Image: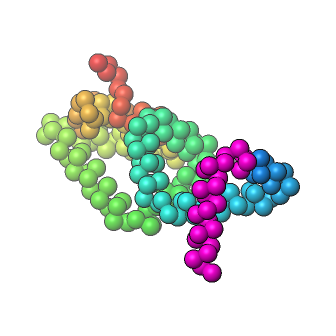
Amino acid sequence: MEKNKEKRALYQKEYRIKNPEIFKKALKKYTKKNPEKYKQMQSDSLKRYQAKNKELLRAKALLYARKNSSKRNKYMAEWREENPELAKSKRAEYCKRYPEKMAAQTSKRRASKAMAMPKWADEFIINEIYDLARLRTKLTGIKWHVDHEVPLHSNIVCGLHVESNLRVIQAAENYAKSNKFWAGMP
């Protein structure tokens, strides 16, 4: 019985390829008579495809995200601004699910700041700038970030972690800017 199913499916596939006009007419007729069944059939087919091709779809999504990073960053910043509570809960959920990734990311960021901080930097003023960002967030209810005007890491330049390179801006603006733009950029 199983062998017959496979043979029949193969025969039907070949028939559809050889006779596309007949198949299209039959499909149109079927969708008009059974729209709900057709939608369910499409949904099931899509789920099977996604299950079989998880890695391929993930790779395509990553490639798209890399090619369109600035567009995606801008969209995500707008989404976070429109959905602050949901964004906060998603972030918290991610942090709980992947604590090792968060620890690694935090350590990497801390190390990069330490490497970019010269001995002559004024730590007191730097700490005051971070306190200002926390205070603005608390008072306004809007998330504020300390931004490096010239990014610490970029394909073009690496800035310093010094008081003259820091400013307090809204989180949405900082996400949209990422490390792609800065004042006086060549």
Residue at image location 65% in from the left, 53% down from the top: 16
Rendered location of residue 89, percent (x, y)? 55, 58
Which quarter of the figure has residue 123?
top left
136 within the magenta span:
no
- Closer to the camera in the image, 183 or 100: 100
Rendered location of residue 176, percent (x, y)? 46, 35
Residue at image location 52% in from the left, 47% down from the top: 138
Please tell me whether residue 94 is drawn above or below residue 143 in the rendered image: below
What's drawn in magenta, residue-wise? 1-24
Check the picture and name the quadrant holding the N terminus: bottom right
Given the current orientation, which residue lies at the most extreme right position? Answer: 33
In the picture provided, is 185 more to the left or to the right than 138? Answer: left
Given the current orientation, which residue lies at the most extreme bottom position? Answer: 1
Rendered location of residue 98, percent (x, y)? 40, 65
- Closer to the camera in the image, 159 or 97: 97
Q: Main secondary structure of the magenta part?
A: helix
Check the picture and name the quadrant holding the C terminus: top left
Residue at image location 28% in from the left, 50% down from the top: 109
Which quarter of the figure has residue 68?
top left
Rendered location of residue 139, percent (x, y)? 54, 44
Residue at image location 73% in from the left, 48% down from the top: 22
Please tell me whether residue 22 is drawn above or below residue 178 in the rendered image: below
In the picture provided, is 71 more to the left or to the right than 148? Answer: right
In the picture provided, is 59 more to the left or to the right than 86? Answer: left
Given the current orientation, which residue lies at the most extreme left position? Answer: 119
